[in-house]
Amino acid sequence: MKERVILLVEDNADDETLTMRALKKNNISNTIVVARDGVEALDYLFGTGQYAERDTSAQPELILLDLKLPKVDGFEVLKKLRADERTKLLAVVILTSSKEQQDIANGYGLGANSYIRKPVDFQQFVDAVLQLGLYWLVLNERPPAYSRNGW
Amino acid sequence: MRGNKPAKRNFTDRLLWTGFAAAIVAAVAIAWTADKDANEANAWSKWITHAQNVLGVLDDTRGNTLSALAAIQNYYQSSDLKNLDRVINLVSKLNRQSVVLRSLTLDNASQQNRLDQFDRNARRMTALAENIVSSAPAFSQQQSIKTPQAAELSAAVDQLLEQLHQMNAAEGRLLTERTARARARSRQSITVLGVGGSIVIGWLLIVGGYALLTTRRLIDTAKALALSHEKLARVTDRKRVEDDLRALNESERRHAAQLEVVNKELEAFSYSVSHDLRAPLRSIDGFSSALMEDYADKLDEQANTHLRRIRAATGRMAQLIDDLLKLALVTRSEMHTEAVDLSALANVILAECRKGEPLREVECVVQEHVVGHGDPHLLRSVLENLLGNAWKFTSKKQQAKIEFAMADQDGQPVYFVRDNGAGFDMTYAEKLFGAFQRLHAAADFPGTGVGLATVQRIIRRHGGRVSAQGAEGRGATFSFTLEVNHGGQQ
């Protein structure tokens, strides 16, 4: 049985730590793969670069995508993965600092499934992570293609 | 085209000058010819006078001759010798007249010839008469003397008359001839003057007309030139105005471009603040929280208090950032004006407040069907701030009352939010609407001091006014107007 991976695309080490903590606090036991910029995220998804050996038939259960990223930003990642047959149906939750109207509009425009602003209050953040974990990992029914890939 | 006109004008000029010169020359020639003819006519008229004089003298001579003839006939009838004395006397007169005639007709050989014969006859007559008188003194005066000498005398008188007649005829012919010549000269002079003058006048008329025409054409050309010059000036003026307008547009465009740049910068700034300023706060709060949780057994109460304060501060700062971004958004967001049901909006907002603090007892009075024209999002922000403030500042009141209504002020709708809460000192009313200005301690009433600044900005963007009345401990009333024109085109 394949691992149920969560791909966390996050360049800020503090945010990475706190997100991991929040996930752990909510007993979300999925494997967390961290990509620290857009290029790393795309390499993971398409089995290129440092992930050239990876079996791309297995794709993450959920992608937590930050927007402000070095090299290739979150919007670019989203655009590319939605354009590719292997990744176009992946669940992508934008998890970022801002709630700028343009960001929200762009995110949904490019096919994000959800848009969540990280609250400053850590407790609120933990609650938010709990909810999105519940929703996307438990409640939500995945598209058929993923079922065929098994898990 | 350009080369053609001066050549044409040169030709015209030459034609004009030639015309004038010809007219002047012709006029001089005509004058000269006419003068010559007139002089000639004058000369002829002298000769006419001369001929007439000659004829006059001839007439007198004939008279004397006829008198002589009459005397001879008298002598025949009366044989009175006194008649012959009279004949002698008359012939001497004839001789004197012959001298006059001779001097008058010196130029005329035939007349001189006739005068010679005349003189000869006259002399014979004198001789015959004297002969008769001298040969017959003895005869009685009554004696008829039809002598051959007397007959000869009579014949001589006839010859005299005949010669006078011839001279008269010749002189008459001369007179006729001279008169005709003088008349011809005069006629010629008149003809020359008339025809020549007419020609000159006609020529002058033509040339003058042409000159006039040319002048008029010149004037027309000058006028057209002046007109086109004026037009050119107008065009130049218009061009200058257009240039000015273009410059104005250019400056306006530059201004707009600058504004756009400033807006873009503000947007970028807001974007950056929104993303980057919050991230460290999350870290501070998150790790403070981690400390409190993971090291609870190692931290005393004091440490926990410090960490709680850190977390509270990050929370306030996060709120401040959000409020600032909202304030910035008021200025840079696009406005879409429509009719907004403010009553419904107020009810929704108050319901939210109530949901946040369900235990509070607040009497909310919202006038029904109050409609305002403006941007729905911005007007919502206004009511959120005003009603939120009212909710907040009545928190210490036992029987809190919040009111939203519309009143008519000078025909203009005024919307107001009234509460019976903490109120404020009117002395500081001015400060209420400044960003970060607070009249209450954060401990009493939390807040960032951005809300009313946001309200003022929004109302100003709608072309309205906002004002506050209140007294410390006795509540506050915030009233605002939207643009007078209900269309509210912004």
Image (tube, coloured by chain):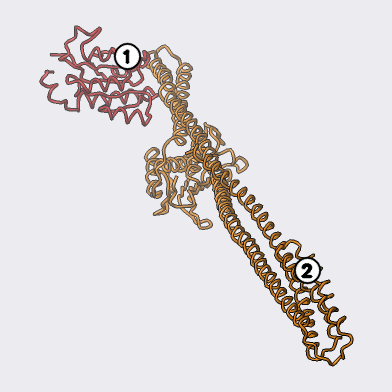
Colour given to chain B in the rendered image: orange
B58 over A96 or under it: above or below: below
Disc 1 crowd, CA 10 A, few/some/many (<14, 14-19, 20+):
many
Q: Are marks 1 and 2 in contact (CB under 8 Å)?
A: no
Q: Residue furthest left?
A: A148
* Residue B467 in sight here: no
Question: Most extreme residue toward the right, as rendered?
Answer: B138
User: Based on the displayed image, in which of its 4 quarters is residue B53 positioned?
Assistant: bottom right
**Mark 2 Cα within 10 Å, few/some/many (few <14, many 20+)?**
many
Residue A94, above or below B432: above
Expressed as whole percent of the image width and height from the top left, the position of residue B174 reads 68, 67
Position of B19 with respect to A67 (left or right) is right
**Chain seen in red:** A
Direction bottom: furthest residue: B142
Q: Position of residue B175 (x, y in %)?
A: 68, 69
x and y, in percent, of residue B182 in the image: 67, 65
Residue B2 versus residue A11 in the image, above or below: below
Q: Which residue is mark 2?
A: B101
- Give the left or right position of residue B59, taking residue A91 as reference: right
Q: Vertical placement of B109 versus A144: above or below?
A: below
Question: Could you say whether the residue bearing mark 2 is in a helix, strand or loop?
Answer: helix
Q: Which mark is residue B149?
A: none
Nearest the camera: B239 or B97? B97
Which of the two discs, 1 and 2, sits closer to the camera?
2
Residue position for label 1: A37
| Co-location on one chain, circles 1 and 2 | no
Q: Chain of mark 1?
A: A
Left or right, B47 with reference to B475: right
